């Protein structure tokens, strides 16, 4: 059987490792092109080297929070990605939800009835995806962010910590919402939005 490795040696690698352990998955090594000083181990797992050193028969799991890197690594390791969703045991997943390949659902999250999460998306600690809300591909819904009922988040969106999207509101692809931002109306243009109510800042 192939051995499991992580790509990405930043902070999110710790969260992924912890969650995998709770699910009984053993990780043998971590790879990243970004040098992180003298860091040789993360939670006892060796940081082996750059991405070009990932064994071609390894089972690869994404371990970075950055959206562009997640999409990039997914493409690069498409033939060896572990497609199984990673779900922290403390997450609450209600009836009738649809999860895409290799989504990551972290601790204390709630995915309510009928919600959909696209492939490669990360739902981070404490976030809430309410009933029938739809999250696109390769999004990062940060800690304690909330997507209210029937709201829609396009592909490659980043919802900052504590951000809230009002029920039934739609957000276009490629949108970032800053920490504690409140999205009260549809956003149709990619960009960075912040504040209450959220306005485009970049
Ligand atoms: C919105 C955000 C992406 C903007 O980052 P940036 O592009 O580097 O922008 P800056 O920090 O230069 O800020 C630009 C302006 O927006 C303001 N601003 C930044 N973030 C803001 C926020 N969340 N709410 C309100 N205003 C904000 C800044 O004060 C600044 O205003 P000024 O020009 O009057 O001084 C960033 O501040 C943010 O909130 N990131 C989310 C981080 C997060 O959630 N991390 C969790 C990871 S799990």
Image (tube, helix red, strand yellow):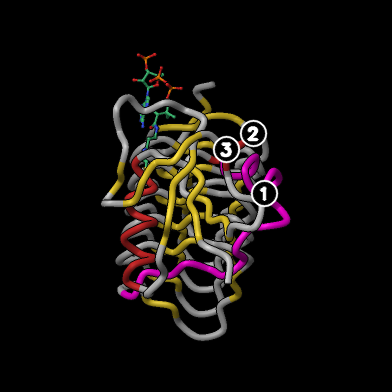
**3D distance between C-alphas at marks 3 and 2:** 30 Å
The tag earlier along the polypeptide, 1 or 3, is 3
**3D distance between C-alphas at marks 1 and 3:** 10 Å
Q: Is residue 87 magenta?
A: yes
Callout 1–callout 2 Cβ contact below 8 Å? no
Residue 4 position (above or below residue 84): above
Find the magenta span and give its range. Answer: 69-89
Percent across and percent down for residue 193 are 49, 32
Circle 3 residue: 51
Residue at x 67% of width, y 49% of height: 77
Residue at x 30% of width, y 73% of height: 90
**3D distance between C-alphas at marks 1 and 2:** 27 Å
Circle 1 residue: 77
Q: Looking at mark 1, is its residue's CB closer than 8 Å to ligand 1?
A: no
Circle 2 residue: 190
- Which numbered marker is on residue 89? none
């Amino acid at each position: 059987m192939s051995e499991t490795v992580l790509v990405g040696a930043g902070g999110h690698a710790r969260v992924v490792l912890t969650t995998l352990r709770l699910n009984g998955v053993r990780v043998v090594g971590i790879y990243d092109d970004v040098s992180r000083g003298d860091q040789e181990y993360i939670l006892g797992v060796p940081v082996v080297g750059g991405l070009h050193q990932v064994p071609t028969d390894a089972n690869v799991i994404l371990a970075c929070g950055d959206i562009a890197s997640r999409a990039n690594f997914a493409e690069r390791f498409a033939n060896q990605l572990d497609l199984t969703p990673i779900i922290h045991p403390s997450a609450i997943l209600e009836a009738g939800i649809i999860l895409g390949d290799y989504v990551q659902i972290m601790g204390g999250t709630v995915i309510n009835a009928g919600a959909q999460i696209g492939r490669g998306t990360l739902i981070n600690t404490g976030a809430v995806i309410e009933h029938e809300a739809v999250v696109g591909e390769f999004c990062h819904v940060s800690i304690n962010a909330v997507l209210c009922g029937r709201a829609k988040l396009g592909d490659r969106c980043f919802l900052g910590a504590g951000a809230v999207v009002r029920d039934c509101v739609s957000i276009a692809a490629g949108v970032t919402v800053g920490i504690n931002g409140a999205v009260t109306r549809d956003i149709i243009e990619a960009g960075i939005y912040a504040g209450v109510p959220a306005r485009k800042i970049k």
